[in-house]
Image (cartoon, rainbow, N blue to C red):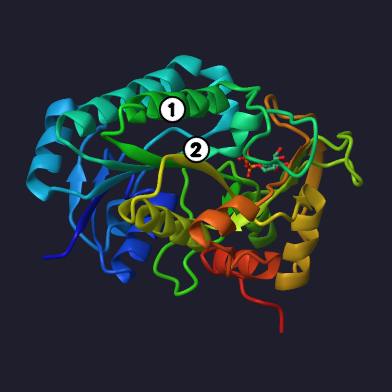
Amino acid sequence: MMTSVLVTGGAGFIGSHACKALSRAGYRPIAYDSLETGHRDAVLWGPLVVGDIADRALLGAAIATHRPVAIMHFAAYAYVGESVREPARYYRNNVGGTLALLETAASHGVEHIVFSSSCATYGVPDAMPILETTPQRPINPYGRTKLIGEVMLRDFCSSGAMRHVALRYFNAAGADPEGALAERHDPETHLIPRALMAAAGAIPALEIFGGDYPTPDGTCIRDYIHVSDLADAHVAALDYLLAGGSSTALNIGTGTGHSVRDILSGIEALTGRAVPSILHPRRAGDPPMLVADPRRAREILGFSPRHSDLGTILATAARSFGLRRAA
Ligand code: UDP
């Protein structure tokens, strides 16, 4: 029988790509998703259980039925700006939901968890690039909920009955290179899809949130990692745990930063279209620069990105907006 892995948020952007990577690696992904933001038609590699992570009875039944060897826990709210405006929702889902998940997993004897953490847990670090030992001082509620998730996991794993890997993602971007999946958020707030929407004429202009940051061109710098690379990092983390690896936290990024303006010029070069833009004030909760030191994931998991050069990220993302490479 194939080994099952329960994937909370398996109908979402990163979770659905992880299901594909699990399937390719010989696992059977069981997507568990409320479909509040996920898409039923993104569940292509195994069954879907429609439910909330806070629903302990349903979650327990799914674990009892499918007997997963591990849980990959993606299900969460993930908008920095929204978390500033509506912190209660973020604490309820990301913290309360994760607690329900961990208690249910523990009571059913699940021994391995791969957790979606975030570079947002670092806040505004004193030095770049960011190491796993860089102090975690999040500056927005979203980052705080992810940090609390990591802390809960450490406490749940301290008895040794459970082990986990917390993956601190930098900026997930791009889409399945084979075109099976796309990034579909509603509303879409992320830079690359919004810039592509502006290039395609679907929105009048891309709003650049802040041109007065202490960076070379004044716009924020992020480390963009292709979602299929992120998915592969999860499979590598799972294999590490199944081989007996101890609990740890790892950055998943490339080590290279791109500014907002770099992204816009990259899209212009790729598509041959102008990206209309307007300068806006800064968005609350945005650190000026987040770039990973990715070496530890390479050492511990043997993971290195394969699709995360900016050209591949933008080309795979552009395809889902019907934009093509310029001739
Ligand atoms: N950004 C922007 N305009 C947009 C969306 C994002 O200037 O319409 C900037 C944002 O301020 C941040 C970067 O692009 O510096 C990446 O933002 P995104 O929301 O994609 O990811 P986050 O870093 O918040 O996870």
Mark 2, secondary structure of its residue: strand
Residue 282 on image: x %, y %: 77, 29
Residue 120 on image: x %, y %: 61, 33
Visible in this render: residue 125? yes
Q: Residue at x 17, y 36 (%)?
A: 109
Q: Is residue 202 above or below residue 20?
A: above
Q: Is residue 211 above or below residue 291?
A: above
C-alpha gap between disc 2 and disc 1: 8 Å
Residue 79 on image: x %, y %: 54, 33
Visible in this render: residue 272? no
Q: Amino acid at mark 2?
A: Ser
On residue 129, the disc is none
Extreme residue toward the top, this view: 88
Q: Amino acid at mark 1?
A: Gly
Q: Is residue 173 above or below residue 57?
A: below
- Quadrant where the image shows the N terminus: bottom left
Picture quadrant of ligand 1: top right
- Quadrant where the image shows the C terminus: bottom right
Q: Residue at x 41, y 34 (%)?
A: 76
Please name the residue that numbered disc 1 is placed on.
Answer: 149
- Indicate yes or no: mark 2 CB to ligand 1 under 8 Å: no
Q: Is residue 29 left or right of residue 89?
A: left
Extreme residue toward the right, this view: 216
| C-beta proximity under 8 Å, tags 2 and 1 | yes
Q: Is residue 245 above or below residue 273?
A: above
On residue 117, the disc is 2
Q: Residue at x 37, y 19 (%)?
A: 92
Q: Nearer the viewer, residue 61 or 25?
A: 25
